[in-house]
Image (cartoon, grey):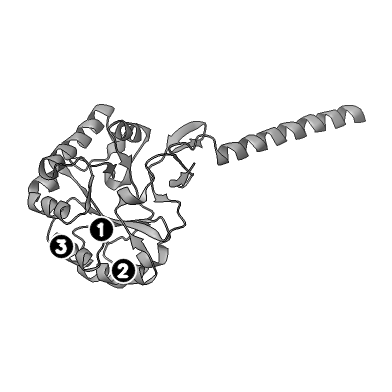
């Protein structure tokens, strides 16, 4: 009886050890290549939230979907601080404000795709996702002559189909690791504190081009980030283009 119990214990211990090794292996390597992670037996893909880097390098970005009253002041402030960044544009915004699109491009900033009509793209078919991508892409190319390579889904909504379609069309899907919440009814001081307190090497910061307090918070944030030694670059210069995998938080990691 004792031998049988001992044998059963050894079998259960071996099984437990095997499961533990498998979990550890998956956590370190399995299903993380190019944004794959295991979730309840299914493989869920992740967009890029941030980048693993030891350099004090970050990206800030502006989503352009509604107005343009603050766009020129933003560009002037960025010039003042010698900062290049990324503007994600919806098709109807680009078509309504083509002069702004051209000026953003002329001043050396990166232009990203933000869909055609700003829908929840996680609810769309593959065909409709493709149409949303191509509509904005065509509008941007018509003005700038350059195809975008980064895409930010409206509302941050995504699923595997969205990421697959974007990648097949030559896009890197971009989220953010620091949300300024500049669209909410909060003060300039709260926005500045929120961003500067949470930024770390490899962060991607989300702003909006028509936020009410942008002329106030942007110089304060850039002052602080520059004094802390951060280099601010467009997202396309921050992310890895190949030989990377994603961790479970959506951070790009070099292979």
Residue at image x 38%, y 33%?
A: 160
What is the C-alpha distance between the residues marked 1 and 3?
A: 17 Å
Labels 1 & 2 near each other (Cβ < 8 A): no
Residue at image x 91%, y 31%?
A: 2
Query: Which residue corresponds to mark 1?
Result: 84
Labels 1 & 3 near each other (Cβ < 8 A): no
- Please give the label number shown on residue 208: none
x, y (%) of residue 169? 27, 32
Label 1: which secondary element: loop
- Count neighbours of disc 3 (C-alpha within 10 A) and say few if under 14, some if 14 to 19, many if 20 or more: some
Query: Which residue corresponds to mark 3?
Result: 70
What is the C-alpha distance between the residues marked 2 and 3?
A: 17 Å
Tell me which label, 1 or 2, sits earlier in the chain. 1
What is the C-alpha distance between the residues marked 1 and 2?
A: 14 Å
Taking 173 as reference, is 7 left or right?
Answer: right
Q: Nearer the viewer, residue 107 or 201?
A: 107
Query: Which residue corresponds to mark 2?
Result: 221
Label 2: which secondary element: helix
Task: Indicate whether 175 appears above or below 36.
Answer: below
Q: Nearer the viewer, mark 1 or mark 3?
A: 1
Q: Nearer the viewer, residue 205 or 4?
A: 205
Taking 39 as reference, is 132 left or right?
Answer: left
x, y (%) of residue 184? 27, 61
């Amino acid at each position: 009886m004792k031998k049988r119990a001992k044998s059963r214990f050894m079998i259960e211990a071996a099984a437990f050890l095997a499961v533990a090794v498998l979990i550890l292996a998956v956590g370190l390597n399995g299903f993380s290549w190019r944004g794959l992670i295991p979730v309840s037996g299914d493989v869920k893909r992740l967009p890029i939230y941030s980048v693993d880097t030891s350099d004090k390098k970050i990206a800030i970005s502006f989503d352009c979907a509604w107005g343009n009253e603050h766009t020129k002041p933003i560009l002037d402030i960025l010039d003042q601080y010698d900062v290049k960044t990324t503007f994600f544009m919806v098709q109807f915004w680009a078509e309504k404000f083509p002069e702004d699109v051209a000026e953003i491009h002329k001043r050396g900033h990166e232009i990203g795709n933000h869909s055609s009509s700003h829908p929840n793209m996680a609810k769309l078919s593959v065909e409709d996702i493709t149409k949303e991508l191509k509509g904005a892409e065509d509008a941007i190319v018509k003005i700038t002559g350059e195809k975008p390579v980064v895409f930010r889904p409206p509302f941050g909504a995504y699923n595997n189909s969205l990421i697959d379609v974007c990648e097949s069309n030559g896009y890197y899907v971009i989220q953010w690791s620091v949300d300024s919440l500049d669209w909410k009814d909060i003060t300039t001081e709260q926005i500045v504190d929120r961003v500067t307190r949470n930024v770390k090497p490899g962060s991607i910061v989300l702003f909006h081009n028509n936020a009410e307090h942008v002329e106030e918070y942007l110089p304060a944030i850039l002052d602080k980030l520059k004094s802390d030694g951060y280099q601010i670059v467009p997202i396309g210069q921050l992310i890895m283009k190949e030989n990377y995998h994603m961790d479970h938080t959506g951070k790009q990691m070099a292979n």
